[in-house]
Amino acid sequence: MYYNVLKILKEGLNDNKGWKKTWQNPEIKKKYDVIIIGGGGHGLATAFYLAKEFKIKNIAVLEKNWIGGGNVGRNTTIIRSNYLLNENEAFYEFSLKLWETLEKQINYNAMVSQRGVLNVFHSDAQRDSFVRRGNSMIINGADAELFDVDKIKSIYPFLDYDNARFPIKGGLFQKRGGSVRHDAVAWGYAHAADELGVDIIQNCEVTGFKIKSGTCIGVETNKGDILANKIGCAVAGSSSVLMSKANMNLPLESHVLQAFVSESLKPFIPGVITFGAGHFYISQSDKGGLVFGGDIDGYNSYAQRGGMDMLEDVCEGGLALMPTIGKARLLRMWGGIMDMSMDGSPIIDKTHIKGLYLNAGWCYGGFKATPASGWCFAHLLAKGYSHSLSENFQLDRFKNGYMIDEKGQGAQPNLH
Amino acid sequence: MIIDHPLLGPRDASEFIYLGDASLLNRPNWDEEKSEDNFYKYLYLRENVAGMHKELWFHQQGDRSWLVISRNTVTHEIFKVELATEFKKNMGKSND
């Protein structure tokens, strides 16, 4: 079903009775060319690009719950490409470019809004590091601007510029960054993939892999065995649990990251703002709620909820940056399970088992990566070798010493 | 979470710093033939279980002792809290 203005007008007059299902509930086939495990943003994007760009037919996406019920519906919806290391920056810039044309590609309104991302800094040393990062962004084809305090004041008058401990000295601004309606990303990719004949199978949990002499030939599920030539796993926080069924230990820990939404307020925050002296990021949704978050709670968790101490920490950061939000009341809070890798960077690679591929380790930066992750993972699955932008995201880089340590904090997940 | 410290009684988890899987207590020998591979596994690979997990916590805001906590990572329920020194002593004796 193709969405357009005429269709909306027609259905408006027709009491909206003519809409068909956005995606179907297909019968499971016995065998597929490619099975993607995980019906989240990355899995659905992978299936879409496999069908659209790499012309693979006969694809299934297996999701143990309903699609988009995991981290793609649990994040703070920010898109940006403001990384320092070349391995990351080139990849995330590719992702941002895909976001810019996403809605046309998938024929779905994902409310991509490039309202700008501002990272404020509070000291000379921090300015220098932000300038360096900005230069790295520009070298990799992204946009970056250095804002002085007057410029920031003209756009964001409500920040606490004269904070005694962390006065704002300027900011690194990426105009093309912004936010996207996160659920619509899952629904849009599902809609577009379904149009191209991808089988999206919900409530189908993979319980094991069928491995014969070092080759993965299929999966065991609660709905029976399904065979496939290639199997791609994109299950984020559940990666370790899933891959343990193939007797693999991953360089990952699963941690909980909380996000918070306030009651609806009149629009006053233009774009995304991050605090430089603590971990705090905030934007205002189109419904008016303040959407904000901070650090992971810092201990292994599969609970999708966190502790009050992290809520306090996040709110302290928020009030230091913009005391004005102190009067807003908190409406909702929730947690998502992050697949924290040992160097803070992702993995898009084949495994030692033939036919079994892994997409994991997104830490808490997976949402903005969704299109590029899907594209590069689809490339790997279709062609058997890595896309040039993801060739550094190897599973065995920890063994070989090619870590991509964006923050320079070493091999401990709860520091990233 | 409340951690029932074996010496100090119940303390809030925010007083503690988390290090990770208690398998970090099993540091491999450096002079074995496969030590390179063993150290790779020791440093970077984790079981990362959904369920019962033995893990290292440091009481930074308290008596600065290392603890081994048995906790369910799905429910956050804590079953056992031991001093890491005691845990290490008993490691050879049982299947821990």
Image (cartoon, helix red, strand yellow):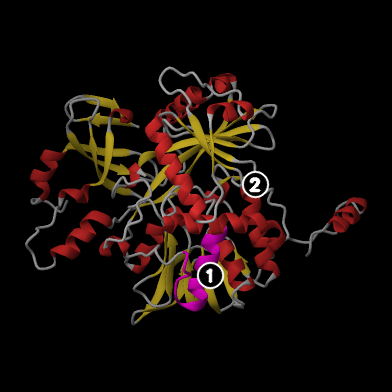
Left/right of residue B35 with respect to residue A265 in the rendered view: left
- Which one is earlier in the sequence, the residue at label 1 or at label 2? 2
Q: Main secondary structure of the magenta part?
A: helix
Q: Is residue A381 magenta?
A: yes
**Rendered residue at 17%/32% (across/down):** B65
The image shows residue A290, relative to residue A229, as above or below, that is above
- Residue A181 disc label: 2
Q: Quadrant of residue A24?
A: bottom right
Q: Nearer the viewer, residue A70 or B43?
A: B43
Left/right of residue A385 with respect to residue A156 in the rendered view: left
Residue A62 shows in this picture: no
User: Which image quarter is the N terminus of chain A in?
Assistant: bottom right
Q: Both on one chain, marks 1 and 2?
A: yes
Q: Assign a secondary structure to mark 1.
A: helix
* Residue marked by disc 1: A378
Residue A104 shows in this picture: yes
Chain ID of residue with mark 1: A
Name the kind of residue labelled 1 in the image: Ala
Q: Are marks 1 and 2 in contact (CB under 8 Å)?
A: no
Chain ID of residue with mark 2: A
Name the kind of residue labelled 2 in the image: Arg
Left/right of residue A108 with respect to residue B82 in the rendered view: right
Q: Nearer the viewer, residue A265 or A65?
A: A265
**Which residues make up the magenta segment?**
A370-389
Circle 1: is it few (<14), some (14-19), or many (20+) Cα within 10 Å?
Answer: many
**Rendered residue at 34%/79% (across/down):** A214
The image shows residue A94, relative to residue A271, as above or below, that is below
Q: Is residue B5 magenta?
A: no
The image shows residue A3, relative to residue A175, as above or below, that is below
- Locate residue A230, reporting x and y percent: 48, 76
Q: Nearer the viewer, residue A63 or A43?
A: A43
Q: Nearer the viewer, residue A270 or A261?
A: A270
